[in-house]
Image (cartoon, rainbow, N blue to C red):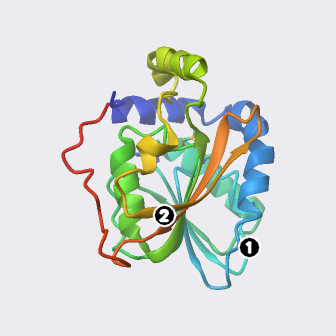
Amino acid sequence: MPIDPEQIERVYSNYAVVYDRVFGRVFQASREAVVRNLKIDPGERVLEVGVGTGLCLPMYPAHCDVTAIDLSQPMLEKAAARVKEHQLTNVKLQRMDAGNMTFAENSFDLVIAAYVVTAVPDYRKLMSEMVRVSRPGGRLVLLNHFTQDSPIIAAVEKAISPICIKMGFRTDLSVDEVIDGWPLIKERDERVKPLGMWHVVECLNNKGLNHGGHKGHEGKQER
Ligand SMILES: C[S@@+](CC[C@H](N)C(=O)[O-])C[C@H]1O[C@@H](n2cnc3c(N)ncnc32)[C@H](O)[C@@H]1O
């Protein structure tokens, strides 16, 4: 079920003031565990999509160049205050739709989306753009809630998704639904806190590296 882009922008703009107190603390240990342990070489170009209030930004090494985008101006203003507070001279912020980015293809070595795949209007557009702007051999990292293997829990997650969408996120996507069909090689899929219901999924961008190529998300309808 696609989510209305204006609704998403409105919801997250309304969250901006309280976001750090509500979603910040709950997920901060996972952000730390994932982002601080990404092996990022000096000079690497990192893109964070859906940066929100910038909670991950102080965790990137100073030796990489970070570009961070979000749809919501109020969220970006919070991120800008964090950049200033931490004197993050290697970070650039831009207001941009992650489903329709203006970056040239192959612009980044690492593209990360933390708690974003299930919060965007159309996850397929997000994935398409993440693949496009990351270089062949580059990495895509998704930190997100994905549906559980247990059929009972997965059924509950699907049932509550329409209610959660009103709050700005969906709960009915599995790892496979999100990454299958793109030229990605899944190198890591680990559960993270809280409750092990969130995953860190790390993929190698395999586009142009073999003849498998893109297996065809075009034409696949949004659920
Ligand atoms: C749940 S928040 C996650 C924020 C941050 N990554 C974090 O770790 O707290 C989702 C963010 O995605 C942004 N977002 C949703 N749809 C987007 C889109 N199409 N393009 C860019 N940002 C988007 C929202 O504005 C919001 O800031």
Task: Tell me where residue 152 appears, x and y as whole percent.
Answer: 58, 16
Quarter of the rendering occupied by the N terminus = top left
The reply, left or right, for residue 182 in relation to residue 51 is left
Residue 217 circle label: none
| Vertical position of residue 197 compared to residue 61: above or below | above
Residue 45's image quarter? bottom right
| Secondary structure of the residue carrying numbered label 1 | loop
Task: Tell me where residue 108 appears, x and y as whole percent.
Answer: 48, 74
At 55% across and 31% down in the image, what residue appears?
Answer: 147
Residue 134 or residue 201, whichever sits in front: 201
At 35% across and 77% down in the image, what residue appears?
Answer: 210
Q: Amino acid at mark 2?
A: Ile
Q: CA distance from mark 2 to mark 1?
A: 25 Å
Q: Is mark 1 within 8 Å of ligand 1?
A: no
Of the image marks 2 and 1, the number of the one nearer the N terminus: 1
Nearest-to-viewer mark from 2 and 1: 2
Q: Which residue is mark 1?
A: 61
Q: Which residue is mark 2?
A: 185
